[in-house]
Image (spheres, coloured by chain):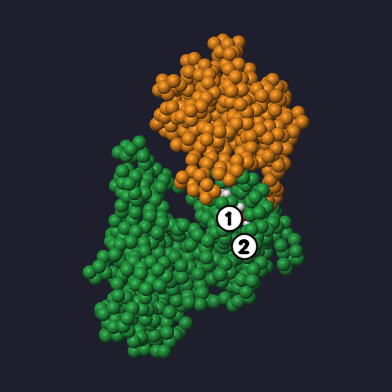
Chain colours: A orange, B green
Amino acid sequence: MKLNRLFKQHSIKGLAAALLCASALPVSAAQEYLLTVTRPGHLHVIDMKTNEVERSCDIPGKFGSGAITVSPDGKTAFVLSNIWEDVYGFDIRSCQIVFHAAQSSASERVKSFQSLTVSRDGTELYTVQNPTRLLSDRYEILEPRLAVYRIADGLGAQPVRTFPVDRRITKIAATDTGEVILGGGDVKAINTQTGDVRMVAALQNWDRGPLWLPPDAFAMHSQGEQANEYIMPYVTARFSDEEWDFETAEWWWGLSRVDLSTGEAELIEAIPFEFIVFNFITDPRDSNILYGSFNTLSKHDISTQETLIVKEMPHTYYNLNISGDGSTIYVGGTSSDISIHDSETLEKIGAIHLSGDMTTSDLRVATIRE
Amino acid sequence: MALINNKTKKALSGSGVLLLAGLASLPLAAQEGHQLLRNNCGVCHAESGSADNPVFSRISEQRKSPEGWLMTINRMVHLRDVEISADDKRNLVRYLADTQGLAPDEAAPFRYLLEQDTNLIETGVDAELVETCARCHSGARFALQRRTEQEWQYLVDFHMGQFPTTELHALSRDRAWYEIARNQTASTLALQYALDTPEWSQWQSEPKADVTGRWRVVGFVPGKGEFDAVMLAERADDGRYDLSITGRYADGSELSGDGKATLYTGYEWRASLTLDGVRMRQVMALDEQGLSGRMFLAAEREIGGSIQAIQDQGEAAVLALLPSFVRKGEHAEVEVIGHNLQADSLSLGAGVVIEQILSQGPDSIRVRVSATGDEGIYPVQLGDVAQSAGLAVYEQVARVDVLPQDAVARIGGGGMMAKVRTAYRVVGYSAGPDGIPGTEDDLRLGYMPASWQILPADEEAEHDQDHIYAGEIDANGIFTPGIDGPNPERRMSANNVGRLTVVATVTDGEEVVEGSGNLLVSVPDFVRRVLD
């Protein structure tokens, strides 16, 4: 029974060990900033010691989706703007724009659905591009591709390499192994030098036999930097027989978690589907503890498959993140307030009010270690 | 005066081909249609073929309803920055619907969309197509189109190009949506809804009827009731028809109005008219019987009712009986509505005795009848010609159907969006020969007066007091939803949404019969669509 629920491609202990190493870094010396984007187009840099907005940077172009990725040194935040077409890189210490890539050209309109990440050495930016062409009397839909930009190219950067990838890729993340994790119908990884693609976690194409509902996986937001992981939630059901009675099925939240230091994944169905969760994050101190947000803020222990705490929220919060020491949870997205909670009890301990609505924006943590 | 104005406007608008006033009332000549396409669309849609038989890329490989063409041209205006004069647009829609429209049989199963009857759960669309296509809009939107396979593929590309996240929605992201839609679904569509069909070839070769003249009309306006009227249609010089209508409601109050109609594709009647100061639309289809369809408020398409009309062709003809039913063994007053009627040639068969003629005229005869026969439909006879209308004699109303059976109303009125109301009616049935209501052989008696109430749909709705907050229903069966925005009186300051059961009570002699419908009171819908 338990084996069915805890389907693993990779030992959960191994991942926990890896995470312990990561959190052994001297957290205290680091300054953490919470980053998010609000309409009509501001990148907010929030000091996580004081929970005050330290500066707000103007993002050129129409609102995108608020997707953000941060360079490993924590100093540059890359934001998707102009209705998912342009990437702007900001020095979060000054708001100076240090990078700009306009992905569309005269012959192609290029959109990226959230997919934005920086290589572990901080030199390259990756996006997944979905190009279309508007001909005189019809659209032509072109194949998606991974585009590699050299961050040092700064303003007006053009891709230095491209490789074909699957359709329907949303969030992506770079690994220490020189790959980029691609979250689409399945979770795959692409080698950023050769373009070779391998399966990391089969979802749409999983082979669970006839009693499992093929998972519905979807990720609109990137997070996981505090646990050094890529996390793709999905919903599945296990039926008692091949009649597929949806009423009597066991419904589960599943998680595909990729360890970004190894590029290895585990698939876990360990959170009973009792309410909608839009995003999950893992506690950086204990990989068995997860937090989820939507109309509720919840805390889960996947080792016991228990939902530990559920807190009704006053409105919908799409998104959440956590401090590096695991003590404080920031719940945001949707509206203009970020709700701050104690991770032990989930009690609300503060709030940050922003100048506009976050809608679909990411909530990321930039850590500057100096 | 009006004539001169129209002509002057056209002369100024530049597409001078339409100026030949004598011709303007005829279907647009092919040459004129080609020229309209060349002038307005040719920059982007490449022309090939011969001068007499030109082919315009994308445009020539599809057929659709007049609304379908209007929707496309409107999109060309909004998204492709096409500038087109109002006259050219109207003439082009008419030309395209006439030459690349749908045959009556092709449109018949999907008339609800043309009639803008949105309170309907679609059935009969292929499961594959529902999943891939009919989850954002109705299935009728594409079932009312005919295309080559390549055109269906280009339509898929249009969706991806215009709405790039289409493949990321639920029911897309768990599969290779684009590949499935472009390869499998497009070929399914090309088989089910092919460009070339025998129905269309047949319809193109048939002679088309002329709708000018005098029409006898019956219909229903929510809040006002059933009416009967005379409608005159006269050709206007712009190819449309000038309409005037006069009549009265069942309660005796008068009705009058005027407007304009267009007959597309030889059978698609579309009219805009002002009835006693209220703007209304008629969407009807013409067949051998006459016109039938729906009339609704221009500003509120949910509020409408059925309408039927027959043309005066010099012979006696019956359109309807009001009411259309009488209980067995009872007496009743019935009005026979039609053209060129003569009381002395009227009969209702062996089971219905005409006891007295109360009034008579060529358009209407009021009689007092006695239902002596057994349960059944007794067709009206004029001399020895049986009419399609008949009087139902019944023993007992055994079942009443609430229409619409499933409806969505929308809260509004507080902000930008108006409330979306629902107009209800009931149709009564007797149990038929098998004595069991709800079976195939039930006898349809007709629309019946009813009293109305709303109840919570279930325990949860009762707990949330949906029946108190979500809105109210009046004596005419019109449901008006609550105001939008958060309601501090409700749990979690919920807005005034709810799930309700609408109950109609019909009194039939000593008996009382109830029927019910499901009503979802939902949030405002900010997307206003031409075609759902």
The chain ID associated with circle 1 is B
Extreme residue in the front direction? A1
Instruction: Point out residue A70 in the picture as x, y percentages from the top left corner.
Output: 61, 23
Q: Residue at 54% x, 23% y: name it.
A: A287
Q: Are marks 2 and 1 on the same chain?
A: yes
Where A233 falls versus B519 (above or below)? above
Q: Do labels 2 and 1 touch, CB within 8 Å?
A: yes
Check disc 2 and report the residue beneath it. B192
- Whether residue A361 is visible, yes or no, is yes
Check disc 1 and report the residue beneath it. B129
Q: Earlier in the sequence, mark 2 or mark 1?
A: 1
Extreme residue in the left direction? B510
The chain ID associated with circle 2 is B
Picture quadrant of residue A93: top right
**Label 2 sits on what residue type?**
Gln
Q: Residue at 60% x, 73% y: name it.
A: B203
Q: Residues within 10 Å of mark 1 (few under 14, many from 20)?
A: some
**Label 1 sits on what residue type?**
Leu
Where B357 falls versus B250 (above or below)? below
Q: Is residue A115 left or right of residue B501?
A: right
Q: Residue at 34% x, 72% y: name it.
A: B435
Instruction: Point out residue B228 in the picture as x, y percentages from the top left corner.
Output: 36, 72
